[in-house]
Image (tube, rainbow, N blue to C red):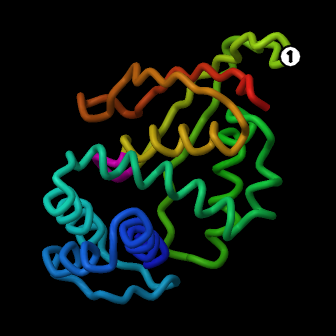
Amino acid sequence: MYGLVHQGIRRMVTEMFSEEIWKRISEKAGGDDVYVAMDPYPDEQTLKLVMAASDVLEMEPADVLKAFGKWWIGFAGTEYKSLLDMAGSTSSEFMSNVNEIHARVGHLMPELKPPNFRVEELETGSFDDHLPSVFELHYFSTRDGLFPMVHGMLEGVADSCGEDVLIEHLVHSSEGNERDIYRVSVTKKKNR
């Protein structure tokens, strides 16, 4: 993982909790307190940060990853707004374009090993009538155990698109499958 992810974890922890909590997590993970955004780090260091955050925050590792996925979308939407604005105005459009976003970022980060996403549209609802739009998201990754982050990212994308979302994790890579599959139902938020 690139240091940008580690910086994101730090920023999320300091924003949601405190600098002192981050220091405890960093010490427990045995890593540096400062990460260079464009430098690659071993995946093991990222997992140590997640496990240390889990311990210090008294949260399950999956819940840490889910919270980070949701936070990351909000952060990226602020820091990289123009790039993400081009990805689409609905969750399914956005997720259909994530591979392209990773391809563009990959030119700057040659050691990037992003996951691959495939969207399969199931039902096209009418946002005007608040009928759900339903799609399956297929998530392929060479890294084990990061699938909860995808769930959080889907929540963050729906928030940024002004959608309510229901996410079902249908197929789990942790059970020996080649991918994770999520069934995602979205409706436009009523208060928008």
Q: Which residue is mark 1?
A: 128
Pick the residue in front: 59 or 5: 59
Q: Residue at x 25, y 72 (%)?
A: 21
Return the x and y of residue 109 as percentages of the image width and height: 57, 76
Q: Residue at x 28, y 46 (%)?
A: 145
Return the x and y of residue 172 as percentages of the image width and height: 33, 28
Placement of 128 over or under 50, stated as above or below = above
On-image quarter of the N terminus: bottom left
Return the x and y of residue 54 as percentages of the image width and height: 20, 56
The span shown in magenta is 142-146
Placement of 9 over or under 97, stated as above or below = below
Answer with left or right where residue 51 lies relative to residue 94.
left
Q: Residue at x 38, y 51 (%)?
A: 142
Placement of 126 over or under 11, stated as above or below = above
Answer with left or right where residue 87 lies relative to residue 26.
right
Q: Quadrant of residue 74?
A: bottom right
Placement of 174 over or under 104, stated as above or below = above
Pick the residue in front: 173 or 51: 51
Answer with left or right where residue 38 lies relative to residue 191.
left
Q: Quadrant of residue 16?
A: bottom left
Q: Is residue 144 magenta?
A: yes
Crowdedness of circle 1 by 10 Å Cα count: few (<14), some, many (20+)? Answer: few
Q: Amino acid at mark 1?
A: Asp
Q: Residue at x 70, y 67 (%)?
A: 80
Name the chief secondary structure element in magenta: loop
At mark 1, the secondary structure is helix
